[in-house]
Amino acid sequence: MGRITIRDVAKAAGVSTSAVSRVFTDGASASATTRARVNAAAKALGYRPNALARALVGERTNLVALVIGQARNVFDSLFLEALADALARHGQNLLISLVHGESAVDEGMMSALDYQADAVVVAAGTVPLATSERCLRLGVPIILCGRVLEREGVDCILGDNRDGARQAAELLVRGGCRRIAYLGRGPTAYSDSEREDGLRDALARLGLAPVATATVDPDNDHGFAAATALLSAPLRPDAVFCGTDLIALGVLETARALGLRVPEDVAVIGFDNVPMSAWPSFRLTTVDYPIATTAETVVERIQARLAEPNLPAIVRRIPTRLVARATTRRIS
Amino acid sequence: MGRITIRDVAKAAGVSTSAVSRVFTDGASASATTRARVNAAAKALGYRPNALARALVGERTNLVALVIGQARNVFDSLFLEALADALARHGQNLLISLVHGESAVDEGMMSALDYQADAVVVAAGTVPLATSERCLRLGVPIILCGRVLEREGVDCILGDNRDGARQAAELLVRGGCRRIAYLGRGPTAYSDSEREDGLRDALARLGLAPVATATVDPDNDHGFAAATALLSAPLRPDAVFCGTDLIALGVLETARALGLRVPEDVAVIGFDNVPMSAWPSFRLTTVDYPIATTAETVVERIQARLAEPNLPAIVRRIPTRLVARATTRRIS
DNA sequence: CTGAAAGCGCTTACAG
DNA sequence: CTGAAAGCGCTTACAG
């Protein structure tokens, strides 16, 4: 095929391949005339350096892998986009490893290593020990998102779930709620369990406790069944704090279906602040998890680790912030 | 670092690097004993072939690039996921090129070519001529999604928008609607304009014409402003067919806000059938655009073209199907 | 079936 | 600043 290589350009420009390489390498030395001749030849031939060959010999591939699960929610999609965007600003490209289920994270990471990714971002499940050790040996940073794992070479970046839950709990209690329930995805979801713990702790500080905690089937119906059970109980909760916005929206729908007024009969708070939660028919009070900030923090951390491979592992909490809308009572 | 290469394995197994290579190449000849010794050595050392080196010398990189715009909607996110999934089943990996605006498609494609992607899927805007010619010369298939471009080497895969619109129009008219309006993203969105044309044609066949066509600002508010104008007009439409589900949901919200009953006062139909449209508070009648089928068709076409590079370009229409829910009148 | 050799497209010390 | 040489990790004809 019409593959133009560095040799073609060198020949056309009457210089060595080293000279061509230097012209295409930032900060390498080349005279103005060499530069001009090489650029002219390259342009005329339509030459572009082969990133793979470059990667094979160079230090970096400029490839960053993202390991994610399938059946992701809006939040994950937005994160993927924000990450791709933030990486692009650093000249890095996003390689996607879509894995099916927790156990496949390993496979996704190995595939990333096969392509010599400069770093791997894991946003699905946790990281097997053998794999993180392999990354460490290879000098490939791992950024684990949405979960804490205290391990050498693994940086964790996630929202301040407990503090978000605290803000939610305090708003509810100040609004007069006393029978507060929690509805989440259950213990498999790390963030959710932190949110539940945060709620519990905050309530305890106020002399209260959750009146119920329930789990939705994430693959199912946003928890319509669980929400129905919760809201039909003889001693109905006067507030439901949810692990995610999607679940909270399901609760809103259920409340509507049961003829309950929100927030008068039951207040609802979500988590994430996905775009939909702001829609007029929902106006969900929720805890904002700043996606762009998270993505940028991930990318900054990658650069830092690439520059300084032996940095100690960190756990970075991204601040969360309550956004009061129409599903909680107004506080004067 | 602890990078294990083919040479390390060869040494440990007491064979040549060629032998190791063959053991790791499907369908290459190696004796059972060689195979066993190489596998044992590889396992002991934790060896995995470098995909980049492999790609540099081999025919394929097993990298497929997806060029997408930012600020995508739910539909695009689901497509990305479905594509990654379908590619994985063929041992191919997804490289994301997120571009900002139409003009950047070129840049995204070039970056894909730099990494020697086996194929590039474009789901944002159209393809510059120079770039498609370059791909053709390089033998890299281009699959353009959601748009038709009659050009050598460019396969187009998109929903049957006109037929979907026809089904929608017929349902509305059979339900008694006569004053049907169209609300879409305007001429910049290729699919939308096909949907509008399809509506117009179908209505014409029934002796009708759209009473209004309006455009929403996609970056703005799902068209609340446009929907409000439409539904507040002196001669209000009795149905609104929308370019996307998101817009249709905006119309539903607007109708609610204006105190209009759906479908009695105004019927609403969307397009795409995103998960949200099935939610209890919306129950949107819409035209299903089968995402998984689309993704699989894309991937199949990639394989076909890779096997047979000189295939003539095609335009493949994915069938669309009306899903009647609660925002249109029941037809007996 | 097997190994030595050449080469994929590039970069990086090394002399000059 | 510049070019010749070596090498990145692999595969693929080519002899044997």
Image (cartoon, coloured by chain):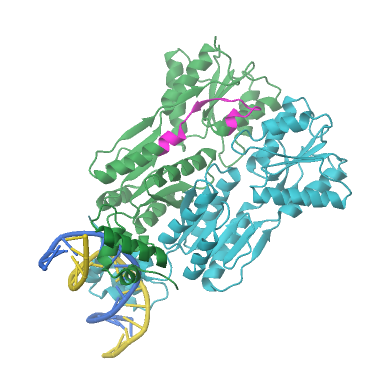
Chain colours: A green, B cyan, C blue, D yellow
Say which of A205 and A304 sits in front: A304
Numbered label tally: 0
Left or right: B101, with A28 as reference point: right
Left or right: A199, with A31 as reference point: right
* Image location of residue A216, percent across then percent down: 56, 35
For residue A282: magenta? yes
* Image location of residue B80, percent across then percent down: 54, 50
User: Which of the image's four quarters has the N terminus of chain A?
Assistant: bottom left
Q: Quadrant of residue A39?
A: bottom left
Left or right: B327, with A213 as reference point: right
In the rendered image, is residue A22 in sight? no
Furthest toward the top, the residue is A332
Which contiguous range is marked in magenta? A276-295
In the rendered image, is residue A184 in sight? yes
Left or right: B237, with A285 as reference point: right
Say which of B7 and B265 sits in front: B265
Q: Quadrant of residue A235?
A: top right
* Residue beneath the point at 66% across and 25% down: A255
* Image location of residue A10, percent across then percent down: 31, 69
Furthest toward the front, the residue is A33
Q: Give the answer, above or below, for where B301 lies relative to A310.
A: below
Q: Give the answer, above or below, for where B137 lies relative to B319.
A: below
Q: Give the answer, above or below, for where B235 lies relative to B311.
A: above
For residue A212: magenta? no
User: Which of the image's four quarters has the C terminus of chain A?
Assistant: top right
* Residue beneath the point at 39% across and 69% down: A4
* Residue beneath the point at 41% across and 70% down: A3
* Residue beneath the point at 30% across and 54% down: A60
* Image location of residue A129, percent across then percent down: 32, 47
